[in-house]
Amino acid sequence: MNKILASALFALCSAAAFTANASGNVDNGKALTAKYNCAACHGADYNSPIDPTYPKLAGQHADYLTHALVAYKRGGEGMNGRANAIMGGMAKPLSHQDMSDIAAYLTTLPGSLQKAK
């Protein structure tokens, strides 16, 4: 019973911590995307990637973008990580707040992504 209670408490605290950092600073996110030259691959409007296999970022859900950046930072060896040499290198120096800020900026941009009906 104690293990279940401890697990539930840990999950609740983790969710609260993530929610607290889920909101980001749009202006800082804009500055960070310029600093790391995200547009070089994802397009100047973040909706026209240079390769069709690269994702469109404009208008994407902020929580998804943050999760993806965390996974790239974690790398292919980590649990739920993503192995991509370019994105891994880009995400490594980012703090969680940086990732939230980038996500907050990108989600405000108009994009071609459509919501399911």
Image (cartoon, helix red, strand yellow):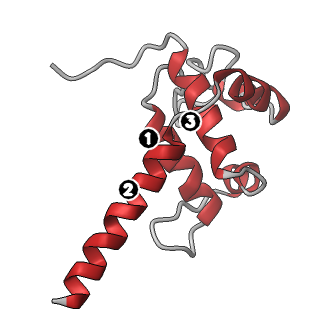
Residue 46 x/y as whole percent: 61, 21
Which residue was labeled with disc 2? 15
Residue drawn at x 22%, y 89% is 2
Circle 3: residue type:
Tyr
Can you tell which mark lies on residue 100? none
Element type at mark 2:
helix
Residue drawn at x 44%, y 41% is 64
Query: Looking at the image, is mark 1 or mark 3 earlier in the sequence?
Result: 3
Q: What separation in Å lies between label 1 and label 3 (alpha carbons)?
A: 15 Å
Query: Looking at the image, is mark 3 or mark 2 earlier in the sequence?
Result: 2
Q: Residues within 10 Å of mark 3 (few under 14, many from 20)?
A: few
Circle 1: residue type:
Tyr
Which residue lies most toward the bottom here?
2
Which residue lies most toward the top here?
110
The residue mark sitting in front, 2 or 1, is: 2
Between residue 41 and residue 92, name the one nearer to us.
Answer: 92
Between residue 20 and residue 73, name the one nearer to us.
Answer: 20
The residue mark sitting in front, 3 or 2, is: 2
Residue 88 x/y as whole percent: 68, 56
Can you tell which mark lies on residue 54? 3
Query: Looking at the image, is mark 2 or mark 1 earlier in the sequence?
Result: 2
Residue drawn at x 33%, y 67% is 11
Relative to 1, say whether 91 is above or below. above
Which residue was labeled with disc 1? 64
Relative to 68, say whether 30 is above or below. above
